[in-house]
Image: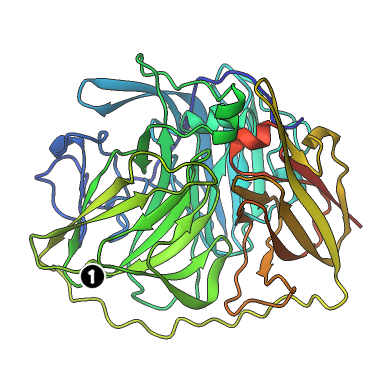
Amino acid sequence: MPCKNSPLYGGFRADFAPVEGTRLASCASVRPFSLLLFTAACSAQGVPPVDQPSRGAATALSPAEALDRDPRPDVVAVTLTAEAVDRELEPGRTVHLAGYSGSVPGPLIRAKPGVLLQVHLENHLTEPTTLHFHGVRVPNAMDGVPDMTQPAVLPGQSFDYSFVLPDAGLYWYHPHYDSVAELGSGLYGPILVEDPNDEPELGDEVVLVLSDLGVDEHGDPLPPASTPDDIVSGSEGGIVLVNGLVHPRLEVGVGRRLRLRIVNAARSRYFKLGMAGHSFVVIGGDGGRFSAPLTVTEPVVTPGERLDLLVTPSGAAGSSVELVARAVSRGMPLPASAEAPLVGLELVANERSASPPLPSLERALAPLATAGAAEVPIALTLNADDTSVVMGIDGVPGDEAEPVHALVGSTEVLVVSNMTPYNHPFHLHGFFFEPRADDGSPLAVIERKDTIDVPPVSRVKLAVTYDDRPGMWMFHCHILDHAEAGMMGMLHVMR
């Protein structure tokens, strides 16, 4: 199978852009614009700050940006080097993780649509690894699936990825080798492809990579789930991280709107976002902007998904409001803790003018033409007892499942049926799909996605057009324990 079970201990290193603004070194640092991250220097929890290039509000909490080594405007070239990383999660408590250039998450790769992205990966781990560019419509050879689209990158070796970024949106990168262990040790990072058609002053942009972490008494990552009950439950860590920090705080100017670009990089944890007395305007997701905004009180982002949210924290200077994650059952009993704090938003006197009213946020996004499109059934199944668990596609584990066949240029409707009593975030490599109503008709708000939650004993219909990128593409549950247990299959796109 493409996902290998082997131990991992290590991380990535990337080169960071030179600092154009202020180093966030302590509570006494100069505030960049209206936002300031309070890091370990002034909080009981967190990690040491890092240099970040000046991009206004985004520098306050967003991950540090990768250095572009190519001066050409139509090329972004970065280097990622795999290595182990030790982090002081809180005073006196060091954890041994994997990270990119000593950072968890890895550096933010920022680019524009149509740009050629070149990523040079060097593996200084003791185990093989790869990079999968989650959500990006890459050529098949760049998909990062070992033994299928490329050989695994062995310790001491390197691999060059090169592809054009065709679509605006927020994406992310992570290994596709021993995914539960490698992702769980800190190997993930965001990619932001800026939309040239974005309206001005949507909000002060902050990229938030949400994840969790489980470590033992020595600070080493816990091994992946091994018992049937734990595999079904998924490897949720007890420590919730926001950009590698435990409950960071962020200063927000009164009247300033935030644009939260959110990635769920956890192995199995769902995040139901909440902010007391507030609602969110959801303007986009996996594949960029929606055709129209949605107002949601508690948006949910499943493993692998992304959200583009607008919210204006309300209150007087000196007050605060918490962004929290509320419990999601996933078909299991709710955890004892009702919610986990994510980010404390501290309201301060505004250093800039208040954000202007929102413009019209509608986009011209036509639904896919599905007249005459074939429906392709895909069943997510589970066979388990007290001693073993096999998750699969159509009743068999992924390595025994018959591939789904499709032709370049064709449009199909995938009918994904969840035959189990548990939620599954279904992820398709390489292609966007468009969620449809149960009768196959377009939804009122059109969106492009690559990951979608399939609730227990239910089904979703997903329209997809296969553009000219033939090859074998994976689809799987993005609760990675479920994928490793067999809930993955193959899509063979042929000319």
Please tell me which residue is depicted at 54% across the width and 57% down the height of the picture.
Answer: 72
Please tell me which residue is depicted at 62% across the width and 79% down the height of the picture.
Answer: 365
From this view, report whether residue 37 is shown above or below residue 128.
Answer: below
Instruction: Return the x and y of residue 201 as percentages of the image width and height.
Output: 33, 75
- Kindly give the residue lying farthest to the top in the view shown: 218
Q: How is the image coloured?
A: rainbow
Q: Nearer the viewer, residue 248 or 436?
A: 436
Instruction: Return the x and y of residue 350 as percentages of the image width and height.
Output: 13, 68
In what quadrant of the picture does the N terminus appear?
Answer: top right
From this view, report whether residue 420 is shown above or below residue 292.
Answer: above
In what quadrant of the picture does the C terminus appear?
Answer: bottom right
Q: Quadrant of residue 452?
A: bottom right
Q: Is residue 122 visible?
A: no
Tell me if mark 1 has few (under 14), some (14-19) or many (20+) residues whose alpha carbon lies within 10 angstroms of its own.
many
Q: Nearer the viewer, residue 50 or 244?
A: 244
Please tell me which residue is depicted at 36% across the width and 40% down the height of the picture.
Answer: 241
- Kindly give the residue lying farthest to the right in the view shown: 495
Left/right of residue 108 with respect to residue 61 in the rendered view? right
Q: Quadrant of residue 255?
A: bottom left
From this view, report whether residue 434 is shown above or below residue 234.
Answer: below
Q: Which residue is mark 1?
A: 256
